[in-house]
Structure formats: C-alpha cells, structure tokens
Image (cartoon, coloured by chain):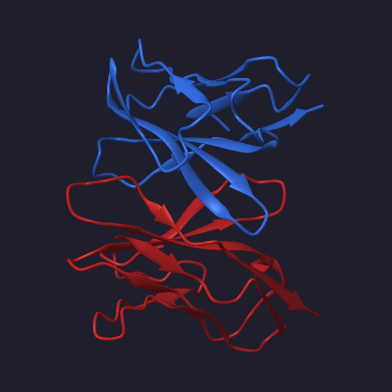
Chain colours: A red, B blue
Amino acid sequence: AQRVTQPEKLLSVFKGAPVELKCNYSYSGSPELFWYVQYSRQRLQLLLRHISRESIKGFTADLNKGETSFHLKKPFAQEEDSAMYYCALRGAGNTPLVFGKGTRLSVIA
Amino acid sequence: DGGITQSPKYLFRKEGQNVTLSCEQNLNHDAMYWYRQDPGQGLRLIYYSQIVNDFQKGDIAEGYSVSREKKESFPLTVTSAQKNPTAFYLCASSIDKGGWQFFGPGTRLTVL
C-alpha cells in the first residue's frame, strides 16, 4: 500500500531559523514525490518534485530511498513561508497522488 | 486565476438533498480528480477520471457520484447517502495520468 506520513501537524519556527518539514513514505517500488503548499486564502499549488531536483523559494527536498524520506528544508525561514505543506507520492502505473495529512508551518517574527 | 475553476465557492444545503459541485478546466488536460480536505485529515481521493467517459473510485467514493461527459468538465454529486458531507472539496487536473496535478480554488460545502 502507498502511504505518506507527515509526523508534525504544526511546526513553529522563528524568522531566520532553519526549517525542516518531515515526510516519510511507504511504497515498495520507485516512487515519485512531491511537495505542495497552500497559503492562506490561496489554492493548493505545487512547490517542488523530486525529479526536478530544483530549489523553489529557497526550499529543497532530497529523496532518500534508504530512509524512505523526502524532507523539505530551507536554511532561513521567512514570514511568508507560513502555510500548510503537503507531501504527496505517486507510485507505478501513474496512479493518482496520495497525500499526507499536512504540516502547518508558522514562522514567528 | 484561470485554468481550473470550481463553483460555487460556498454552498449550503439541507440534510437529505443531493448537491452537485462544478469543476471546469481549460488546460486541455486528460485527467481530473476530486479530493476532500478535512482538518487533520489531509486530502483524500474521492473519484478520478483519466479520460472522457471513464472514471474510477478513489479511497472514499461512498456517497458520491461523478460524470465525465466532456474533457473540460468533471462534476461531483454529493448524495444524501454521504454520512458526513460538510467539507472542503478540491478538484484537480493533470495533463495525463502521469502528470503533476493543478488544483482548483475549492468549494466549501456545508450541510445544515
């Protein structure tokens, strides 16, 4: 079965501090992993995907197959990063995305 | 915001009534999806369609129905059989079944 676990419902950090949003997955094959973000009063939008290996808004995420993790990181948090973050997985056969329950990031000034 | 639209933004219905949520996209995407978003539950898949005139049940399809008569449209009907219909409903589309998903703005349904 495909499963995504985001262990933290809420993460509060101070502005300028490093951020790490945890995501672990359960899947026997080679997954495709994504991070989506939902800012207040905005629609859910793609932040980054592991196959792109890019940095978006200062965020990066590395797929660690050994630890089955895809943690989202940013070295210096900004107030505008406050939002709901969802990790998502797609398995073989191009099945629909499976989402974690989300982590609300609050950046305190 | 264009691309994928949902209407209405807020919807109120009495218990026992069926209600249909609209989802339209002008991105020429083949695949469309319906998710339900509840606090602390994340997004849960209701139904999805990878091509016109075909759709599959997701994880929580009971009490819901869909149709896909046109490529641009994927309406969701919340029936009276759905035990807890009050929620935020999100529609999404992707260029094909392997593409990443674009999301609509959502419809908040409240059943009184």
Compared with residue B83, is residue B99 higher up or lower down, i.e. above or below? below
Q: In which quarter of the image is the N terminus of chain B?
A: top right
Above or below A9: residue A32 = above
- Judging depth in this view, the residue of A74 and A25 nearest the camera is A25
Which of the pair B3/B72 is nearer the observer? B72
The residue that appears at 63% across and 80% down in the rendered structure is A77
Q: How many marks?
A: 0
The reply, left or right, for residue A104 in relation to residue A49 is right
* Left or right of residue A51: residue B45: right
From this view, report whether residue A52 is shown above or below residue A79: above
Q: In this view of the protein, can residue B32 be seen by the observer?
A: no
Q: Position of residue B83 (x, y in %)?
A: 64, 33
Single out the residue that lies furthest toward the bottom.
A17
**Quadrant (top left, top right, bottom left, bottom right) of the C terminus of chain B:** top right
Could you tell whether B37 is left or right of B44 in the image? right
Q: Where is residue B94 in the image (x, y as percent from the top left)?
A: 34, 37
Query: What residue is shown at x 41% (from left), y 66% (from top)?
Result: A4
Q: Nearer the viewer, residue A89 or A37?
A: A89
Q: Residue B79 location in percent, x, y?
A: 59, 20
Q: Would you say residue B38 is visible in this rendering?
A: yes
Left or right: where does residue A50 sit relative to residue B80?
left
- Residue A101 placement: quadrant: bottom right
Q: Which residue is drawn at 40% across and 62% down?
A: A48
Tell me which residue sits at (36%, 16%) in the image.
B68
> Which x, y percent locates residue B12?
78, 23
